[in-house]
Image: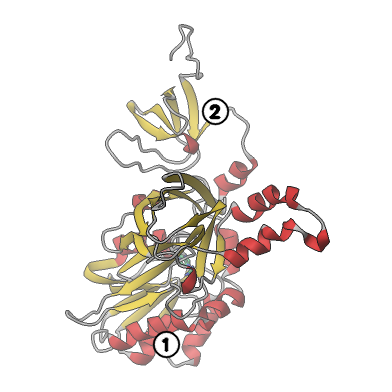
Amino acid sequence: MQSDKEGGDDGCPEECIALSDFTGSGSDQLAFTSKDKLLVHAKPSSDWWWAELHGVIGYVPASYLRPVGAAKERDEETCLEDPWQDEEYFASYGTLRLHLEMLSDKSRTEAYRQVIFTNSASLRNKVVMDLGCGTGIISLFCAQLSQPSVVYAVEASSIAEYTRQLVKQNDCEEVVTVLQGRAEETELPVQVDVLVSEWMGNCLLFEFMVESVLLARDRWLRKGGVMWPSSAALALVPCQAESYYAEKIAFWEQPYGLDFTPLQPLAQKEFFTKPKFSHLIDPSDCLSAPCDIITMDMYTLQVEDLEEMKGQFHFCVERSGVFHGFTAWFTAHFESLETEGATVELNTGPNSEPTHWKQTLFMLDRPVRVYEGDSISGSIVLHRNPIWRRHMTVTLQWNINSSKEETDNCQVGTKSFPMWR
Ligand SMILES: N=C(N)NC/C=C/[C@H]1O[C@@H](n2cnc3c(N)ncnc32)[C@H](O)[C@@H]1O
């Protein structure tokens, strides 16, 4: 409600600075770039404001703006320099720890070898880009198992110097060219026939390396070229997590004969606010069949789609038990270069060989007993962090429709999990 004095009750009109780019979707949203100065005319809700930039007016996400002159958040200070945190991100890949973890993951690494092997004939004389090649394993598979004309192995971290040595050490210099630098800033002499990358993070999107892959696709993949992975999907299942719950919450019931239950609310906040990475769910803890709730077509997905990825779900409870939370994982698919050729799948779920990603567990604040025949339906939103561009928040909303008359028919819940900021 506008008051009659010059400014409204909500301080409008108010000049604000943009903390990050916003591409917007839908005709009524106003796109802007980081550090733009917008004039906010109204704040109809806490999430969306009505603002003007260069004479154009539209809705903008309030979380992307800071009133001019307002105190800068510590985070904002550091993140305005580096919203991608590239310095620490690429430093972490400059050491062997993460490369050893990824190379030790047989499921992951063998899946990529299988892709190269089954397409070896079609890769002959092709131009390949391996985006984020790390130690160059995928590029070396290409040179060893097929005869591409060239593989551009692009790697931003300092490991690239060693990758060059590995290429030489394995007599692959004729085929593999290591280019050190961010893919976004790398110039290739030609378009590529195949863009291969192992970009998937926890919960599929964390790290948002996929943005670099999409930008490289738009710039370097020739018309009709192939993306590996060609598609990816995020799977979800309602689950039990009895031992994790006992370890973090039940523990306080009676440690050493004492009653420590006043600490349980603290424990729930400390241990269940963020998702649990590297959770290995036992198939018997799945309360229903899983379902793919978000699918990504790597040929049509756009960078702006990454701001907010949504999915719906409806699970039929197949076994009575305790609904402690949801578990998520991903699958990636690699289409064949030959028409009618076999697709290779990398599945990081509980019914496949474990991978270094394992699965991701989202714990509810309070477990709920559910019975065979109940249904759990709702939605998931992966909302990219407008400031820390490699992070996101996962918001789950669920309804439990009980098949038992005695319990009240429907229980509703919602919870947001930051990953990590
Ligand atoms: N999280 C999973 N699965 N893989 C992470 C894999 C990350 C590897 O790709 C490199 N990388 C990531 N983004 C870029 C980029 N834009 N340009 C060049 N190299 C990049 C990192 O330095 C790691 O070596």
What residue appears at the point 42 percent right and 89 percent down from the top-left corner?
172
Between 295 and 172, the one nearer to me in the picture: 295
Asked whether mark 1 lies closer than 8 Å to ligand 1, one says no
Q: Spot the residue most to the top.
A: 4
Colour convention: secondary structure
Name the amino acid type tagged 2.
Val
Pointer 2 with pointer 1, Cβ within 8 A: no
Between 286 and 87, the one nearer to me in the picture: 286
Residue 54: x, y in percent? 36, 28
Name the amino acid type tagged 1.
Glu
User: Quarter holding the N terminus?
Assistant: top left
Residue that numbered label 1 is attached to: 173
> Which mark lies nearer to you, 2 or 1?
2
How packed mark 2 is, by other alpha carbons closer than 10 Å (few <14, some 14-19, many 20 or more), is: some
Residue 90: x, y in percent? 56, 65
What residue appears at the point 40 percent right and 58 percent down from the top-left corner?
211
**In the rendered view, would you say 286 is above or below 259?**
below
Q: Spot the residue most to the left.
A: 339
Residue 253: x, y in percent? 73, 57
Between 221 and 260, the one nearer to me in the picture: 260
Name which quarter of the figure residue 130 lies in. bottom left
Residue 91: x, y in percent? 60, 66
**In the rendered view, would you say 50 is above or below 11?**
below
**In the rendered view, would you say 36 is above or below 288?**
above
In three-dimensional space, the C-alpha distance between marks 2 and 1, rounded to whole angstroms, equals: 54 Å
- Tell which circle, 2 or 1, labels the residue nearer the N-terminal end: 2
Secondary structure beneath dot 2 equals loop
Secondary structure beneath dot 1 equals loop
How packed mark 1 is, by other alpha carbons closer than 10 Å (few <14, some 14-19, many 20 or more), is: some
Residue that numbered label 2 is attached to: 68
Between 361 and 282, the one nearer to me in the picture: 282
Tally of numbered tags: 2
